[in-house]
Image (cartoon, rainbow, N blue to C red):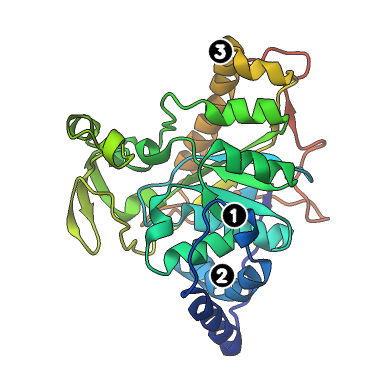
Amino acid sequence: MLTIPREPRPRLDAVRDALAALAAKRGEFPRPDDLDARDPRFIARVLPLLGLLYDDYFRCETEIEAEIPAGPFLAVANHNAMTGTPDMFCHMVAFWRRYGTVRPAYGLMHDVPFHFPYAGAWLNAGGAIAANPENARHALARGAAVLVFPGGDVDACKPTREQYSIRFGRRRGFLRLALREQVPIVPVVSVGAHQSLYIATDGRRIAERLRLPDLVRSNVAPIGLALPWGLILGVPLPHLPPPVKVHTRILRPIRFDLPPEAADAPGMVEEAFERVVGVMQAALDTLRAEGRHGMFPRKGSGSGRSADGHPDGRDGESSTRGRTPAAR
């Protein structure tokens, strides 16, 4: 297994240039449905600053079980806590370090962050696009990597006592997309950031009674504690996370040897869903047992690297050829 290495701290002039790049973008309006809003040069300029946060604040540890596919693929990740936590940030920094900023990569994101002052334009330039099937299809057609968090707010705002569970609910759209576009799924699991706040309840019943799913596209109304707000009462505002250690593992790609028409077969979709979630839950359980995350991470490293720097393993893929999608 390969671990994305820590990089030397950037020089002061590189940090200043990163801040200048951010300042230059803040006056732009985000274009959530425009794939050309992604700016590789901007990413390269801000990467030294992001690397400081990645290495020294969140102490990110990202492991790769096998090299990701060269062509388009769908990266499917769990949410590692509520808005304000750095799961997408950590995933993208690790990707850029390993595969470069020029290789096209996008993250599907809820509409709301695009409207945050300055942040919307920064996220857009980094590859964030509005989370809808059309944008995802266009990105895959360009040969891009596409990151999706199927659990959305339900997964992000799950109670702290359930932080080590995959919560995708009834959402199967990501699987239908992968089957129709005939692209592999790369599962990504992450732990640690959920310990940056406390969530007592996701408040889904409250959200239903207040008709929040219809009014503001929110299925939750979380209640808990987070900096700097103190008490959270129903609105999942971005919080200020303390320096919790984030541990991420990018799992072996999964290919389903099924025709595009399988996307319209509920039974096949459900079996494929169970396989993907089963693989992710098992990996999440492993990260929990290893304990190298959160406010008080266990010391030690469980990563392994072959002499040539590539992950151990032969073909680097988990395939369902010759088996049913639910086969373990």
What amino acid type is highlighted by mark number 3?
Pro
Which one is closest to the eye, mark 3 or mark 2? 3
The residue to which callout 1 is attached is: 34
Q: Residue 233's x, y, as percent?
A: 17, 48
Instruction: Please name whichever residue, 77 or 27, is drawn nearer the observer in this view of the structure.
Output: 27
Residue 328 seen in the figure: no
Quarter where residue 46 is shown = bottom right
Which mark, residue 323? none
Which one is closest to the eye, mark 1 or mark 2? 1
Q: Relative to 171, is 89 above or below?
A: below
Q: Separation of disc 3 and disc 2 at Cα? A: 42 Å
Instruction: Please name whichever residue, 292 or 212, is drawn nearer the observer in this view of the structure.
Output: 212
Q: Residue 6's x, y, as percent?
A: 62, 67
Determine contact: label 3, label 2, CB under 8 Å. Answer: no
Which one is closest to the eye, mark 3 or mark 1? 1
The residue to which callout 3 is attached is: 266
- Does label 1 or label 2 sit earlier along the sequence? 1
Q: Relative to 23, is 1 above or below?
A: above
Q: Residue 125's x, y, as percent?
A: 57, 64
**Position of residue 8 in the picture relative to residue 31 (left or right):** right
What amino acid type is highlighted by mark number 1?
Asp
- Does label 3 or label 2 sit earlier along the sequence? 2
Q: Relative to 117, is 113 above or below?
A: above
The residue to which callout 2 is attached is: 51
Q: Separation of disc 3 and disc 1 at Cα? A: 32 Å
As helix, strand or loop, the secondary structure at mark 3 comes to helix
